[in-house]
Amino acid sequence: MLKNRKIAAALASGALAAGLLAATPAIAMDEEPAEVQAAAAQTEVQEEAQTLAHPRYAYGKVVARSGVKIRAKATTASYALGGFNHGAHVKLACKVKGQWVHGNQIWYKLADRKGWVTARYVKNLKHVNYCR
């Protein structure tokens, strides 16, 4: 009988030790290793840099000596919301075909405020996509 108790105690101790060892990796897996965290942070930085390198808007420059008016719609008949002076850099979101202005029917939608400017008086400094 004493022999059976020793065997039972040894098996119980072995099972307890094996259970603790098996649980240790599961606990350790809850926290990511430093290398994994560093790689994730580097990936986030790379994605942010790519977004900054390829913004969602293009720039244009006002070439009209008298400046250009910002219109509510892509037509000179719409309400004037303001204007830009000659040489001003403008953020352009996209372009559409609108009213013809001195041989040019392209209008740019502004990226950082409401309104439109005619392409006749704004030179795009980077490719501008058509609005969807």
Image (cartoon, rainbow, N blue to C red):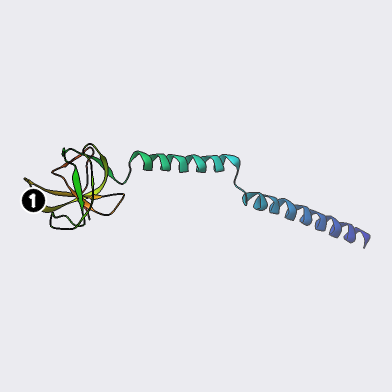
Towards the viewer: 111 or 128: 111
Residue in view at x 84 percent, y 55 percent: 10
Q: Amino acid at mark 1?
A: Trp
Which residue is under mark 1? 100
Mark 1: secondary structure: strand
Residue 62 x, y percent position in the rendering = 20, 40
Residue 84 x, y percent position in the rendering = 23, 44
Question: Where is the C terminus found, in terms of image quarters?
Answer: bottom left
Residue in view at x 89 percent, y 60 percent: 5
Towards the viewer: 48 or 26: 48
- Residue 66: image quadrant is top left
Q: Residue furthest bottom?
A: 1
Residue in view at x 66 percent, y 49 percent: 28
Q: Residue furthest front?
A: 66
Position of 2 with respect to 45 (left or right) is right
Picture layout, residue 46 above or below residue 94: above
Q: How many marks?
A: 1
Position of 23 with respect to 36 (left or right) is right
Picture layout, residue 96 above or below residue 64: below
Residue in view at x 79 percent, y 54 percent: 14
Towards the viewer: 132 or 69: 69
Question: Where is the N terminus found, in terms of image quarters?
Answer: bottom right
Residue 92 x, y percent position in the rendering = 25, 46
Q: Residue furthest left?
A: 103
Position of 30 with respect to 48 (left or right) is right
Position of 45 with respect to 76 (left or right) is right
Give the class, few, some or many, for how many residues have Cα within 10 Å of label 1's Cα (few <14, many ≥20). Answer: some
